[in-house]
Image: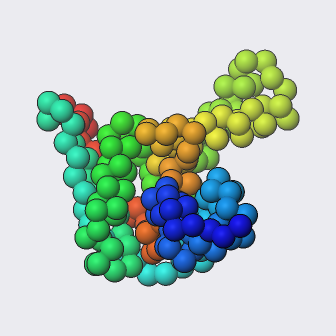
Amino acid sequence: MATTAEQIKLLREQTGAGMLDCKKALDLNGGDSAKAAAWLMEKGLASAAKKSSRQTNEGLIQSYVHAGARMAVLVEVNCETDFVARTPEFKALAHDIAIQVASTNPKYVRKEDIPADVLSAQTEKYKQDAVNEGKPANIAERIASGRMEKYYQEVVLLEQAFVKDDEVKMSEMLKSAIAKIGENIVIRRFIRYELGGE
């Protein structure tokens, strides 16, 4: 069965992939748009991984001021070219990231940003908590490890669930954006101000 222009158009609107990629995906998946979309996502995530080593010297600083002007966020999001930095898709991504920071108040962008002394102190605290709950030392170790995963989800931006779709982690949302936009994208830093806060 031949792929129709209408099928290609619908898949392109759904995924944001190029026309030729949509045609190829539909041809390879017998015209099944769901399978074609999944194939394109896989291909996009693979290409996002390849792009992760590219330099990101362009981008923008996005601001978000919450209603009532009692809280504001500045986030720096970088990409490879100034052309992409000016696109509506990139600006929307940066805005979504700023909203995420405003909503969840993370402390770090990625796990690697957490200072070693903070990590060891937090792990030790969780171990001690487990021992205080009457758990044996070997079990306390595993409990601390599980609690550290929850800690990462609270304080690390890329480990959090995306506020607009809690089924998706921020790191997955970013990879998806890289696949769709076609350039490496890095969340460089952010700052969150709250009236009366530190």
In this rendering, is residue 37 above or below 106?
below
Relative to 74, 117 lies left or right: right
Q: Position of residue 152 (x, y in %)?
A: 56, 43
Q: Is residue 179 visible?
A: no
Q: Quadrant of residue 183?
A: bottom left
Q: Quadrant of residue 101?
A: top left
Can residue 134 be seen at all in this image of the molecule?
A: yes
Q: Horizontally, is 104 left or right of 98 in the view?
A: right
What residue is shown at x 34% (from left), y 80% (from top)? 81
Instruction: Answer with left or right where residue 25 lies relative to residue 189.
Output: right
Q: 138 and 34: which one is in front? A: 34
Q: Is residue 103 left or right of residue 12?
A: left
Q: Which x, y percent locates residue 78? A: 36, 69
Residue nearest the observer in this picture, 100 or 16? 16
Whether 103 is drawn above or below 61: the answer is above
* Residue at 19% over, 42% down: 65
Residue lying farthest left? Answer: 69
